[in-house]
């Protein structure tokens, strides 16, 4: 329908009014109690209890009386007379932790060993000499701002590593390699920042491509999947019986005995999946074609409202701040308990610790967890409502004479204000259900942990895992229905229960069309995240293996490119996922709005033509048409 003078004054805000005020009041009361818990955590907690080292007497370095001026933790090494210096367990063992003012940077011993340069023991970090033992101080470097760990760059320790390569030192090498990997991340900040920007640009580009080429992309994806399954099956069939020879000693013996049969069975499964994909592509050809057109319309709606393209960035920053604040508060609250440094009566290791909470403190922690889940779910609900509101405004805006739609630049901001001021109760209602299910999951996981500690009863484990699976399925179902309910509220300003009833009615009428569109959007979203993540991984590897990042004298030298690549992939994946969520909400909102128009016999005159085609095709197929 083209715009006329009467349609010119269309305003979605006129439809909206306050909904579910009781739930809004309940949420506000919960927030007030949550704020009181935060005040208690700040007054009684000490975050330093979490990451400061603990000496052998159970004192927290830099915190407790007697060690206030000794902020670092160092592990003493005691050597028996005549013990070879190459004994890694004596030098690197996590025994006798002590608090020190500075980390030792050279060797010192009361029992020097020939061939190694030792300093006399004058000012040791407080290590005690046992009977027949000699205190030995080894060179260390500061790690994570708190821990004095062996300096693997020191010439003598490198010599020791070369002289002794045994299974005893494997854990030490792994620990050292892990620490070196983490140490590469600060120097890689220019690369990670650049990858963040590249992921944003690639996400923009992907949505732009979908706007014009959704159908070719989905067919290219399906064809590529068919070819990959077929090639993989052929490769496994040809090489059946020989693959284990290339896998080293990590293959179980039972698998080796039946390698030929297992490999050929897997090859047959791959071929079967390839055939299934071919059948699905042929059987749903018309549905895929129409759904792809709907995807293009969803991308067009996003591009016609540029503010929607920047929403993922705002969400990423908002969630980064919110999650950081919530985690910090949880750690503060948890540290209100007493610290126990040993496990099951063992001596303090310097790192391991546990907190003993009183029953009131346990209640505070449980309430804090529940409110954290509720707050996060509420913010997600508000985010979905904002996007739905903007797309609803786009949907109900009549077409211009040239076939375009004119929408405001502030639709997303309007959606946020409408959601906060008029529908906070409904959003709190839906998010409360999610928070309850998440708390039930945590309770089941805690019960399973306790079951493992007291005997690991397999029957109890089976029951708990079965219940946990059911709860997770319920959570996913509730989240999906909530998403559609928020769309209904954006359309009609119904309360939450009425919106859910409308959602169930719409699913019954549009089940086929919604299933097809959901499947197509999920495919596009998954492959979008995959492609963007892989592209960023490739760019990261190119960057970190060239230029200043490979020069050892450079301040940006990166010792472990793989660790940087992993972090870059995680960053790119999170950015891409945020953009794909916008795309998913746009597609579902457009289809839901048209479904409500069809059910209400209003004609859907402002609906894009591909939505009408998709619904008409599903009606025709369900009535027996070919």
Image (tube, grey):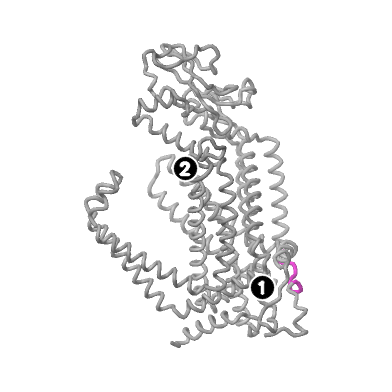
Residue drawn at x 75%, y 82% as measured from the top left: 7
**Badge 1 element:** helix
Nearer to me, 443 or 16: 16
In the rendered image, residue 620, in percent from the top left (x then y), is placed at: 49, 86
In the rendered image, residue 286, in percent from the top left (x then y), is placed at: 46, 80
Nearer to me, 179 or 261: 179
Q: Main secondary structure of the magenta part?
A: loop
Nearer to me, 271 or 463: 271
Reading the image, the residue beneath label 1 is 392
Question: Does residue 489 appear anywhere in the picture?
Answer: no
In the rendered image, residue 98, in percent from the top left (x then y), is placed at: 54, 22
Image: 153 above or below 297: above
- Which quadrant is the C terminus positioned in? bottom left
Reading the image, the residue beneath label 2 is 450
Residue drawn at x 51%, y 40% as measured from the top left: 558
In the rendered view, does 406 fall on the left or right side of 380? right
Q: Which residues are magenta?
A: 13-20
Question: Does residue 499 appear anywhere in the picture?
Answer: yes
């Amino acid at each position: 329908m083209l715009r006329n003078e009467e349609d010119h004054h269309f305003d979605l805000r006129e439809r909206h009014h306050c909904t579910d005020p009781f739930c809004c009041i309940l949420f506000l009361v919960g927030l007030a109690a949550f704020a009181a818990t935060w005040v208690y955590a700040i007054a009684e907690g000490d975050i330093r209890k979490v990451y400061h080292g603990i000496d052998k007497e159970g004192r927290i370095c830099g915190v407790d009386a007697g060690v206030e001026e000794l902020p670092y933790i160092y592990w003493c090494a005691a050597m028996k007379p005549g013990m070879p210096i190459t004994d890694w367990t004596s030098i690197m063992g996590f025994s006798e932790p002590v608090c020190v003012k500075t980390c030792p940077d050279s060797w010192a011993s009361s029992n020097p060993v020939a061939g190694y340069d030792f300093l006399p023991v004058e000012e040791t970090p407080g290590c005690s000499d046992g009977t027949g033992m000699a205190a030995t101080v080894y060179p260390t470097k500061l790690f994570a701002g708190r821990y004095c760990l062996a300096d693997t760059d020191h010439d003598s320790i490198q010599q020791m590593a070369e002289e002794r390569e045994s299974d005893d030192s494997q854990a030490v090498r792994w620990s050292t390699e892990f620490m070196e990997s983490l140490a590469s991340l600060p120097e890689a900040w220019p690369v990670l920042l650049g990858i963040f920007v590249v992921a944003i640009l690639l996400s923009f580009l992907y949505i732009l491509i979908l706007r014009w080429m959704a159908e070719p992309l989905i067919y290219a994806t399906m064809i590529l999947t068919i070819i990959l399954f077929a090639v993989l099956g052929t490769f496994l069939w040809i090489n059946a019986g020989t693959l284990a020879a290339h896998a080293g000693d990590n293959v179980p013996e039972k698998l080796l005995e039946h390698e030929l049969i297992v490999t050929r069975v897997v090859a047959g499964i791959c071929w079967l999946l390839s055939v299934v994909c071919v059948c699905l592509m042929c059987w749903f050809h018309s549905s895929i074609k129409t759904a792809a057109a709907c995807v293009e319309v969803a991308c067009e709606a996003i591009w016609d409202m540029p503010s929607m393209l920047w929403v993922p960035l705002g969400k990423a920053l908002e969630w980064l701040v919110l999650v950081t604040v919530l985690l910090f508060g949880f750690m503060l609250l948890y540290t209100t308990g007493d610290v126990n440094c040993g496990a099951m009566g063992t001596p303090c290791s310097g790192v391991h610790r546990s907190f003993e909470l009183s029953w009131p403190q346990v209640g505070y922690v449980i309430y804090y967890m529940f409110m954290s889940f509720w707050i996060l779910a509420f913010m997600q609900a508000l985010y979905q409502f904002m996007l739905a509101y903007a797309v609803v405004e786009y949907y109900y805006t009549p077409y211009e004479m040239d076939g375009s739609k004119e929408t405001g630049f502030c639709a997303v901001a309007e959606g946020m204000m409408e959601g906060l001021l008029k529908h906070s109760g409904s959003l709190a209602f839906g998010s409360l259900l999610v928070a309850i299910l998440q708390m039930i999951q945590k309770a089941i996981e805690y019960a399973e942990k306790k079951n493992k500690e007291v005997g690991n009863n397999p029957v109890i484990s089976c029951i708990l895992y079965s219940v946990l699976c059911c709860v997770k399925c319920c959570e996913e179902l509730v989240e999906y229905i909530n998403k559609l309910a928020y769309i209904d509220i954006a359309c009609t300003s119904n309360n939450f229960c009425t919106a859910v009833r409308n959602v169930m009615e719409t699913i019954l009428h549009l089940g086929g069309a919604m299933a097809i569109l959901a499947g197509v959007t999920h495919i596009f979203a998954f492959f979008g995240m995959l492609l963007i993540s892989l592209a960023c991984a490739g760019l990261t590897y190119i960057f970190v293996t060239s230029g200043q990042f490979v020069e050892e004298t450079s301040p940006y030298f990166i010792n472990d490119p793989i660790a940087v690549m992993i972090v870059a992939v995680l960053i790119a994946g999170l950015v891409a996922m945020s953009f794909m969520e916008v795309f998913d909400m746009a597609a579902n909102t457009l289809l839901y709005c048209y479904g409500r128009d069809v059910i209400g016999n209003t004609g859907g005159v402002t609906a894009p033509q591909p939505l009408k085609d998709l619904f008409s095709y599903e009606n025709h197929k369900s009535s027996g048409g070919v």
